[in-house]
Image: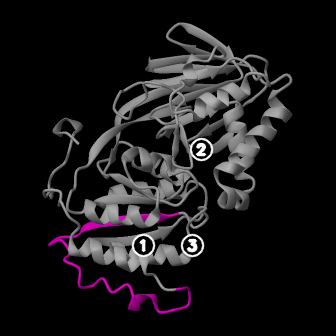
Amino acid sequence: MSAAENERTGDTQPHPSEPSASEANASVALRDAPPAGRDESAVLDLHTLAAPAIKKRMLIIVNPYATTVSDRLRNLVIYALQGRYDVDAVDTEAQGHATELCREAAHEGYDVVVAFGGDGTVNEAANGLVGSSTPLTCLPGGSANVFGKILGIPGELVDATEHLLRMADHWRPRRVDLGSVNGRYFAFSSGLGIDASVVERVDQRPRLKARFGPWWFTYAAVTIFSRRYLLAPPRLEVTVDEQRLDGVTAIVQNASPFTYFGDRPIVVAEGATLSSGTLAGCVLGRASALDMPFITWRALSRRARLARHRRVSAFSDAGELTVRSTDERPLPLQVDGDFVGEVYEARYSTRPQALSVVS
């Protein structure tokens, strides 16, 4: 990370070439966690860690309904992080609660907020911290954890916890861009059409989402496509930089990749980064049974580019754009992998350097 990325280096120390004793102890504590029902504190004896002289105040916002978060993991992670930080932890209780908690955290002067959950939790946290100096970071608790991986945070919980422990000695917050749609901010992506319909379907069956992960997404995509989009799908029009792009699905990105299939990044839009100050995206012109296998192959391929498919129209370097329904049917909308409802029009813009992050 360069000095040009708006670093705040108040307690910055050189990055250690080898793990410190505290990191090693925390790693052992998490990896050797006892079965449920045993005295976990006997294994998690982290009070001998070489803590910083002044611990940074950390608020962990936990989504207890996230696909991989259990009470036991929650307690293990919090206890491990207490070796390096002054930790408070709060469980979310309803939709939008994380946003309220983050606004309070920024007002009360916390040094960092940790979104412990999936990308929906991250999205709510970002909406609460936008414009403030309080940085956001992540712990993986969902099925994809896209934003955390984009920031360089490991996708496995134990590795991510160790990463946050090391971060205490290598403290470099930076500012990143956020996208906005109809007044709601998003960290990496938003979409209308097939993409949003799949998200809606997946979220209706959280147990299947937790158990089968990307395979449940795949099944949902096939069924949604065949039932709703193969014949007479809702039509939309994207207006960007005086261009008009017609189609059945629009994806708008503030960062890349669009998502992950397991650990494999799915690249859709090209040119989207967290520091570009612009949005990128693509429009699928039609939903055809002949085209979809090749589109899917391009999305999963490490070499082929989705934007070069003949049914896909790509755009980049967009400051603003509008997506409208052209047949008077509402369009499903998702932000950062969360279904947020149906709209007839979606107005997109970007807010450069709106969010402070540390990773």
- Camera-side residue: 315 or 29? 29
- Camera-side residue: 168 or 36? 36
- Vertical placement of 336 versus 67: above or below? above
Dominant secondary structure, magenta: loop
- Camera-side residue: 270 or 291? 291
* Crowd rating for badge 1 (residues with CA inside 10 Å; few <14, some 14–19, many 20+): many
Residue in the picture at 31% in, 51% down:
358
Question: Do tag 1 and tag 3 residues touch (Cβ < 8 Å)?
Answer: no
The Cα–Cα distance between marks 2 and 3, rounded to whole angstroms, is: 21 Å
The Cα–Cα distance between marks 1 and 3, rounded to whole angstroms, is: 11 Å
Residue in the picture at 17% in, 57% down:
15
Magenta range: 35-62
Residue in the picture at 33% in, 48% down:
357
Pointer 2 residue: 337
- The N terminus: image quadrant: top left
Name the kind of residue labelled 1 in the image: Val
Q: Taking 207 as reference, is 140 left or right?
A: left
Name the kind of residue labelled 2 in the image: Gly
Pointer 3 residue: 70
